[in-house]
Amino acid sequence: MTITEIVLRLHANSYYFFAIILFIIGFHTMLTHNNLIKKVIGMNIMDMAIFLFFVAIGYVRGGRSPILEPGVNHTFINPLPSALILTGIVVAVSVTAYALSLIVKLYKHYGTIDAEEIMRIRGGGSL
Amino acid sequence: MRKLLILFFLAVIMVVMVATVVEMPTIGDPANVTNNEVPRRYVEESLKETGALNVIASIITDYRAFDTLGEATVLFVAIAAALSNLKAH
Amino acid sequence: MEDVIVRYVSRFILPFVQLYGLYVVLHGHLSPGGGFSGGAVIGASMILYALSFNLAAGSKKLSHDVSSILESSGALIFAGMGLISILLGANFLANRAAGFPLGTPGNLFSSGSIAIITFGVGIKVASTMITLFYSLIEEEDHSHDHH
């Protein structure tokens, strides 16, 4: 496919493209910074990108929110991806809470939250 | 050196993901493959079988209530793990 | 924090925030919302109280024992509804096949076990947020002179 065809397809599926960009931004944040809290923030951004990608699958053009009114017929969006992502959001919050408690314990033990300094104190080599 | 390696790795991931997204069906098409008979049945029969006006609430607490029970367990286990980490004497 | 304006305004708007969170939880089967978002609003109101006043007043309002009892009872309500539906003769976590009264759609007391399950999930999520906040920012006095 030529470049113009790719750009037009990405413009039609723009929600998926922005989810990809968010994923790349979150992954870059997680790999580059040395601060442990910034790594947790990068993991959260990656989670939100996946949720955006999954919920955007269920969109129907011209549809409304799936709240029924008895007697009136509308077209609704697909309710199934939204219902499955609710569980995913709660799991992401739980993993973030546990990671933050681990960071509190690390700070109490080593006195710093810089990942390279912690590896240096422990005696291993840096990358 | 490390920054170049990171950028190359991210570029490879981005090329693979864009090559997948270009082949996916258009957003918002009512004739998508994902709008098959399963969401249609949930929307049509939800008022008769559960009596709730909110379709998503009836999906997560009636049709698929077992998944919500698993999620409540995950919340509980995360709180127990975080508390046992922070309040150890 | 010690600000007069934050204290005055938060003392004024906290009952309305909690009333709104309770509305979102109880009307989970009629309007958008449900257990998770309503529980997050109620938990956020208690965190606002602990932030604008100090932490001692907040933990006196909702002590550690009460919040752990609330969280366990939220999970037990969920599992208990499933076991009740076994006792009534149907599968685990069944709604209409177990004989719960469905009522007319649009009322507050309708749709069987959905309202009770939503309420249990709501208080569980609220007490989870409160417990996490109190345990993460609580300081012990013997860890300040580290090096």
Image (spheres, rainbow, N blue to C red):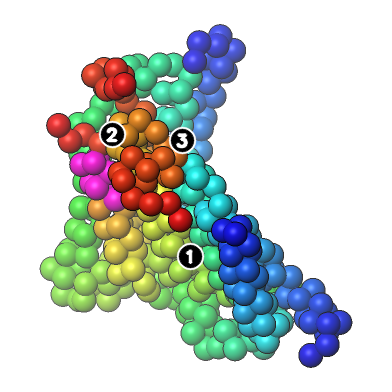
SS at mark 3?
helix
Asked if residue B40 lies left or right of residue A127, the reply is right
Q: Quadrant of residue A66?
A: bottom right
- In percent of width and height, residue C17 lies at 51, 32
* A86 up-or-down from C22: above or below: below
Circle 2: residue type: His
**For discs 2 and 1, the disc positioned in front in the rendered view:** 2
Residue at 26% x, 69% y is: C93
Number of numbered discs overlaid on the protein picture:
3
> In the rendered structure, the residue with mark 2 lies on which chain?
A
Q: Categorize mark 1 by other alpha carbons within 10 Å: few (<14), some (14-19), many (20+).
A: some
User: Magenta span: helix, strand or loop, mainly?
Assistant: helix
Residue at 67% x, 82% y is: B19
- In percent of width and height, residue A91 lies at 39, 58
According to the picture, the residue beneath numbered tag 3 turns out to be: C44
Which mark, by number, is residue A109?
Answer: 2
* C127 up-or-down from C104: above or below: above
Circle 1: residue type: Ile
Which mark, by number, is residue A85?
Answer: 1
Residue at 30% x, 57% y is: B74
SS at mark 1?
helix
Q: Are marks 2 and 1 on the same chain?
A: yes
- The tag earlier along the polypeptide, 2 or 1, is 1
